[in-house]
Image (cartoon, grey):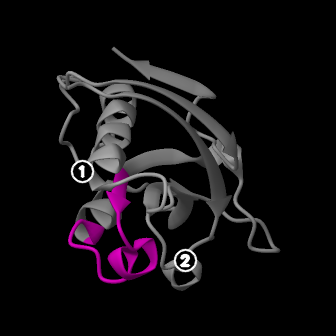
């Protein structure tokens, strides 16, 4: 039976070091961007490189298999930046995370992690609200 999910993603910024990303289930956003003198990201410089999901974001982002793509696709004057939004395993399973991942990818079409970039083809419907440090994502997305 198809699911009808409503998800709020509270994005946190972890800068250019994935070591701070928590070992929790959720979604990650990989950006290319510039940092100010204090190490904070400059949102107007952000380019979306990838969106993914994991049962353990911290572990997944250290030594990620798509890291070469991130480094190839980022502008020469930018660094790879990490954002993470928890989707607690107590409320969501891997299938739920994959549905959210696919919906976001179908709308944003990142150059790395391209599954679903051609469109959302799941029977499930989803409404996503992005809060926190969500840029460059929009505030809301729906599939179908």
Q: Mark on residue 22? A: 2
In the image, 128 versus 137, the foreground residue is 128
Q: In the rendered view, does 15 fall on the left or right side of 121?
A: right
Which of the image's four quarters has the C terminus?
top left
Horizontal side of 67 relative to 79 (left or right) equals left
Residue lying at 59% horizontally and 81% vertically, measured from the top left: 20
Location of mark 1 (residue)? 113
The magenta stretch is 51-67
Q: Label 1: how many residues lie within 10 Å, few (<14), some (14-19) or many (20+)?
A: some
Foreground residue among 125 and 116: 125
Please name whichever residue, 98 or 45, is drawn nearer the observer in this view of the structure: 98
Which mark's residue is nearer the viewer, 1 or 2? Answer: 2
Which element type, helix, strand or loop, lies under badge 2? loop
Q: Callout 2: 10 Å neighbours few (<14), some, many (20+)? A: some
Q: Is residue 80 above or below residue 46?
A: below
Q: Residue at x 52, y 65 (%)?
A: 82
Task: Identify the element where label 1 is drawn.
Answer: loop
Q: Determine which quarter of the picture holds residue 72.
A: bottom left
């Amino acid at each position: 039976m198809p699911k009808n999910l409503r998800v709020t993603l509270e994005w946190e910024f972890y800068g250019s070091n994935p070591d701070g990303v928590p070992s929790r289930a959720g979604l990650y956003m990989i950006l290319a961007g510039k940092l100010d003198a204090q190490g904070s990201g400059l949102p107007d410089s952000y380019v979306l490189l990838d969106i993914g999901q994991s049962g353990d974001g911290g572990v997944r982002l250290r030594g990620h298999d798509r890291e070469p793509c991130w480094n190839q696709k980022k502008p020469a004057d930018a660094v790879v930046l990490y954002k993470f939004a928890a989707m607690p395993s107590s409320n969501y399973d891997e299938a739920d995370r994959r549905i959210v991942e696919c919906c976001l990818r179908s709308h944003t079409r990142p150059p790395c992690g391209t599954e679903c970039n051609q469109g959302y083809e799941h029977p499930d419907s989803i409404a996503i609200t992005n809060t926190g440090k969500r840029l460059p994502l929009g505030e809301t997305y729906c599939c179908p």
